[in-house]
Amino acid sequence: MSWLLLVAAGLVEVAWSQSIKPTAGFTRPLPTLLCFALAAVAVYLLSLAMADLPVGTAYAVFTGIGAAGAITLGVVVQKDPVSLGRLLALALIIGGVALSRATTPAG
């Protein structure tokens, strides 16, 4: 269950990362409220996952999911540039998350 909570936290973090830009520097009230709410939900889910998982593993996986999702959505939705280096970075992040999951006892 803790791994499912961790994945959910990471996915909410991806949504949070995408919600920052529409705040226009936190000058738009509704997008800003959504941004803060998503951040709070992501951290809450992460804290629940940390009840059974090592802190370092949980945080690394959480940020890895967030980074991979932000890069992917940046390329697909925001039309961010694609380069071999960015694709390699994405592959390393995904590999690190998978390795962390494979080598951490079930929680």
Image (cartoon, grey):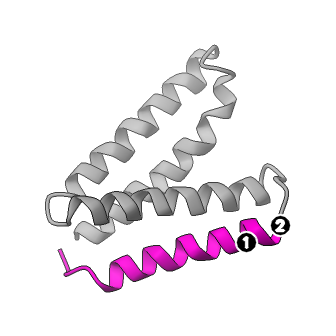
Gap in angstroms between the C-alphas marked 1 and 2: 6 Å
- Callout 2 crowding tier (Cα within 10 Å): few <14, some 14–19, many ≥20: few
Residue 104 part of the magenta segment = yes
Q: Which quadrant of the figure has residue 32?
A: top right
Residue at x 73% of width, y 71% of height: 87
Looking at the image, residue 94 sits to the left or right of residue 106; the answer is: right
Q: Residue at x 76, y 68 (%)?
A: 85
Residue pointed to by mark 1: 87
Residue that numbered label 2 is attached to: 83
Residue 101 in magenta? yes
- For the residues labelled 1 and 2, say whether their Cβ atoms are less than 8 Å apart: yes
Classed neighbour count for the residue bearing mark 1: other residues with Cα under 10 Å, few (<14), some (14–19), many (≥20)? some
Percent from the top left, x then y, of residue 33?
Answer: 49, 24
The image position of residue 19, as x and y in percent, is 60, 37
Instruction: Compare residues 98 and 38 and report the one nearer the observer.
Output: 98
Give the residues drawn in magenta, as a range: 83-107
The quadrant in which the N terminus is found is bottom left
In the rendered view, tell whether residue 80 sits above or below residue 18: below
Instruction: Report the residue that reaches farthest toward the bottom.
Output: 102
Q: Please identify the dominant SS of the magenta region.
A: helix
Compared to residue 23, the image places residue 76 above or below, namely below
Rendered residue at 61%/34% (across/down): 20
Q: Nearer the viewer, residue 78 or 54?
A: 54
